[in-house]
Amino acid sequence: MAKTISVIIPVHDKASTLPLMIESLSYQLAAPDQFELIFVTDRCTDESPLIIEDFQRTTEIQVVKISCEEGSAARARNLGIKAATGEYYFFLDSDVIIPQDFFVKLIARLRSDHDAVFLVPIYGNSGSLSTWPFLVQDHDAWRTMNSAELLNWAATESSLADLRIGHASKTDGSLDHLYAPWVFCWSSAMAMSRELLAAVGGFNPSFSGKGSEDLELGYELHAFGSSFKMMLDTYALHLPHTRNRHSEEQIDRLQEREMLKRYPTRQMEALCAFDGAHANSMLELLEGIDIQTINHLTTSLNKYTHLEELNLPQMIELAIGTPPAWLMDLVGPDYVICPCIEHSEMHLPLFGFALPFEDGTFGAAIMIGLWQLFPERLACRLIEEALRVASVVYLIKDADLGNCLPLSPQQLSIHDAPYWERTYPLRRSFYDFKLTQCGREQTLSSFRVERSAGVAR
């Protein structure tokens, strides 16, 4: 018989957290005939399948166990979707517990807004066994509490609070006022209607392991016109377990770069360059770079005649910034990166903080205009990304170019702090680079830019 909600739970070696998670599902106030539990075991090597099978035998709740042998959270969820009978889907990780009244509240919210994606605040979402001693007073308390006690305790620990709450509307939890609400689409505890998910085709299974498939799904849902709302009247708790954070950050970076190749937009660039927590803040600040700013730059740079004095090579494949017409004619780049440009296959409306190209894709790149207006931290990020994708990078500097960008370096530095920087250190100082002057034409100077030797990374 069809249920109201299908709860889809991918499981990979979570024997340490499954008992508490299952306990929280067992104690739901919603009638058992309103929901079904679909566990999809993903190449488990521990006791997780046996724990689920024991639960199947002892509960009146409808429990379905499916085996996924392909090692992918996206594939596991898609298998769960195929088996689901519910009007709505609720995706829940196997290390997350929910309050007793959760499904009662969730059903009411889903029925009130059929076209919304509902995101559940998750306490301790980025925590692990190694970090809990830093975050909470009694870090071993969770080992002796039941799920209800643990949820009550966690709600008093402000250090475990979900960062997304601060971005949500206080009235209805909406995230739709943000430039990119989809960056908060975390499938750890997320619900939506069957029709809404079907409209975008489910999770992309091309990602290996667990990673960015939920963010890509959020991007597609946002493009489809979905609303995103935090459920501020309830919450969940991510139970601590051993995590290889270094490996997770490496996977995140690789997968986000793949997403930028598929969706070379400023929203996706902001996610890849600044991470989900900072993407919306940076997008808001960078709105100061508008058509008027671009026009000012290109007008200023269009006044030169003896361009051979710059001693630039005849072939430069990539231009980044605000290339004027003479530069386009001079070097004829294959790709142009500029935030206020019409999007085409060869013209990408990006800033250049993250580029949808592999390392060393181009022989030569050139930067002009926009890099001069950014504070040092951000200018260095543009330079380093150019050096990543091109073997040789040239800078053009205009001594007459005034600062027409109303951006505060202090504000920018606050939000330019991606969580993965400890794994991928960024060059933040002009001392990390060296310039070799190539030529000069009136107030224009051309340089070749390289990384400074001896900079440890």
Image (spheres, rainbow, N blue to C red):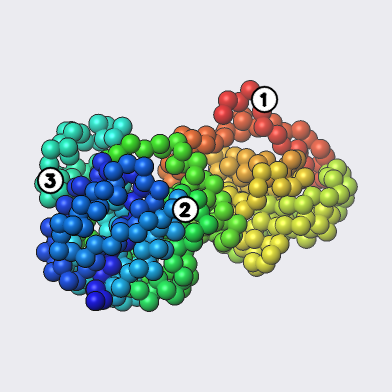
Q: Which residue shows up at 40% across the image and 63% down it?
A: 79
In this figure, which residue is indicated by the disc labeled 3? Answer: 146
Give the residue at x 36% y 38%.
243
* Whole-number angstrom distance, CA of label 3 to CA of label 1: 56 Å
User: Distance from label 3 to label 2 (Cα)?
Assistant: 33 Å
Sequence-wise, which precedes: disc 3 or disc 2? 2
Q: Which residue is mark 2?
A: 70
- Mark 3 or mark 1: whose residue is earlier in sequence: 3
Q: Which residue lies most toward the top here?
A: 454
Nearer the observer, 73 or 368: 73
Residue at the disc numbered 1 = 453
Q: Quadrant of the C terminus?
A: top right
Q: What's the residue type where badge 2 is placed?
A: Glu
Label 3 sits on a secondary structure element that is: loop
Q: Quadrant of the N terminus?
A: bottom left
**Front in this rendered view, residue 269 or 311:** 269
Q: Is residue 205 left or right of residue 2?
A: right
Foreground pick, 238 / 222? 238
Of circles 2 and 1, the one toward us is 2
Amino acid under label 1? Answer: Ala
The answer to which quarter of the image holds residue 222 is bottom left
The answer to whether residue 134 shows anywhere in this view is: yes
- Residues marked 3 and 1 touching at CB (< 8 Å): no
Q: Is residue 437 left or right of residue 343?
A: right
